[in-house]
Image (cartoon, rainbow, N blue to C red):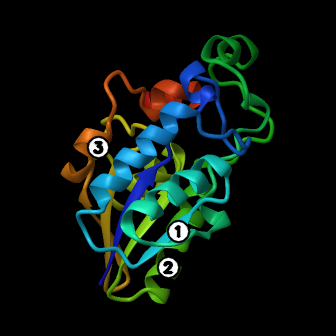
């Protein structure tokens, strides 16, 4: 069995402004680095053997900060854990999206949710094969974590996926299973008034509401 802690990266300025980031490489801000440190301190209460991250800088830096606290070096970068590509919606705020892409309008270049889930889940299967019997921290993105969650436990959790939050999964007998959404280990790392993934991402909010 392999245990995974899926961590959402710390806050960026675009998160704070509620702009869609997707594949755009936006760095952490000061709050995001504080969140990463807090999450690292909490994860340090457990033993971890590997550290993996999306190659986007906000996730990779979050992972490096966490690694300093849990005694691991720089993360292995896994491109399949990168955030969903939102095409021409990237960089836009909610009102800008509603004006440019009314409900039902196609967003050119947007990656299908199913494709995100397929690549992210495949990455976790491969990591489990390379790290049997280990405990692995995986730093990724709200859209990636939501895609994994909806694949392995569809409809079970609609709660916020906040910056710095930790969600535990295990891989056994070829299957991925949710252990704990918002693992209690991370309660302190959810900063007051932190925005969740759907609130920061108007297109994801629409999809959740079935619009």
Question: Which of the 4 image quadrants contains residue 93?
Answer: top right
Camera-side mark, 1 or 3: 1
Camera-side mark, 2 or 3: 2
Which circle marks residue 204 in the picture? none
Say whether residue 15 is left or right of residue 36.
Answer: right
Mark 2 residue crowding within 10 angstroms, few (<14) / some (14–19) / many (20+): many
Q: Quadrant of the N terminus?
A: bottom left
Task: Say whether disc 1 or disc 2 marks the residue closer to the N-terminus.
Answer: 1
What's the CA distance linking mark 2 and mark 3? Answer: 24 Å
Which circle marks residue 127 in the picture? 2
Q: Secondary structure at mark 2?
A: helix
Mark 3 residue crowding within 10 angstroms, few (<14) / some (14–19) / many (20+): few
Task: Say whether disc 2 or disc 3 marks the residue closer to the N-terminus.
Answer: 2
Q: Vertically, is 134 above or below 123?
A: below
Q: Vertically, is 33 above or below 174?
A: above
- Residues at badges 1 and 2 in contact (C-beta under 8 Å)? yes
Mark 1 residue crowding within 10 angstroms, few (<14) / some (14–19) / many (20+): many
Camera-side mark, 1 or 2: 1
Say whether residue 188 is left or right of residue 174.
Answer: left
Q: Residue at x 31, y 65 (%)?
A: 169
Could you tell me residue 40's position as x and y percent? 37, 55
What's the CA distance linking mark 1 and mark 3? Answer: 24 Å
Q: Residue at x 35, y 21 (%)?
A: 193
Tell me the residue that label 1 is attached to: 52
Task: Say whether disc 1 or disc 3 marks the residue closer to the N-terminus.
Answer: 1
Which circle marks residue 157 in the picture? 3
Q: Residue at x 59, y 39 (%)?
A: 28
Relative depth, front residue between 94 and 21: 21
């Amino acid at each position: 069995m392999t245990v995974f802690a899926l961590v959402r990266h710390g806050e960026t300025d675009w998160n704070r402004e509620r702009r869609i980031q997707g594949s755009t490489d936006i760095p952490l801000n000061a709050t995001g680095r504080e969140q990463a440190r807090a999450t690292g301190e909490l994860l340090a209460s457990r033993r971890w053997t590997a550290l993996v991250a999306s190659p986007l800088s906000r996730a990779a830096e979050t992972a490096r900060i966490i690694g300093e606290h849990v005694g691991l070096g720089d993360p292995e970068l896994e491109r399949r854990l990168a955030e969903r590509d939102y095409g021409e919606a990237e960089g836009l705020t909610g009102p800008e999206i509603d004006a440019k892409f009314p409900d039902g309008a196609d967003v050119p270049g947007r990656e299908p949710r199913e494709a995100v889930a397929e690549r992210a889940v495949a990455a976790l299967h491969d990591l489990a094969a390379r790290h049997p019997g280990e405990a692995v921290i995986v730093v990724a993105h709200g859209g990636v974590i939501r895609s994994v969650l909806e694949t392995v436990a569809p409809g079970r959790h609609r709660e916020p996926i906040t910056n710095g939050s930790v969600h535990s999964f295990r891989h056994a007998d070829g299957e991925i299973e949710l252990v704990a959404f918002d693992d209690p280990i991370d309660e302190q790392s959810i900063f007051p008034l932190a925005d969740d993934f759907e609130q920061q991402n108007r297109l994801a909010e629409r999809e959740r509401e079935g619009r």
